[in-house]
Amino acid sequence: MKISVELTLTPLQDNFEPAIIHFIKKLRASNLKVLENPLSTQVYGDYNEVMQVLTIEIKEAFDLIERGLLYMKIVKSDRHDYEPHF
């Protein structure tokens, strides 16, 4: 099953950028399709592969920050090529 995941990591601390950059670089290094914009990062691929990578990388990201939030949305389909029809 293919999924699309939108992630927003929000460290609740000063000097938050290094943790976010590290998280995104780790996702880029995976075999997954990763797209970024100023507000979030999207990851696309097979459910089991995506969740396996996210489980590892989210834990590592949380280990690198004192406090923080991670917002995650999951859609059951690969939407990486979505274009608005309006």
Image (cartoon, rainbow, N blue to C red):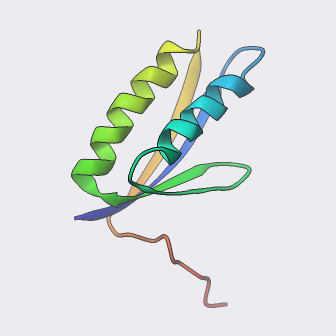
Q: Position of residue 20 (x, y in %)?
A: 64, 31
Q: Residue at x 47, y 44 (%)?
A: 29
As displayed, is residue 58 above or below residue 73? above
Q: Position of residue 39 (x, y in %)?
A: 70, 49
Kindly give the residue lying farthest to the bottom in the view shown: 86
Q: Quadrant of the C terminus?
A: bottom right
Kindly give the residue lying farthest to the top in the view shown: 66
Q: Position of residue 23 (x, y in %)?
A: 55, 33
As displayed, is residue 84 above or below residue 55? below
Q: Is residue 67 left or right of residue 15?
A: left
Q: How many marks?
A: 0
Q: Position of residue 66 (x, y in %)?
A: 59, 9
Q: Is residue 70 left or right of residue 2?
A: right
Foreground pick, 53 / 11 = 53
Q: Quadrant of the N terminus?
A: bottom left
Q: Residue at x 34, y 40 (%)?
A: 53
Foreground pick, 58 / 69 = 58
Q: Residue at x 55, y 15 (%)?
A: 64
Q: Residue at x 48, y 14 (%)?
A: 63
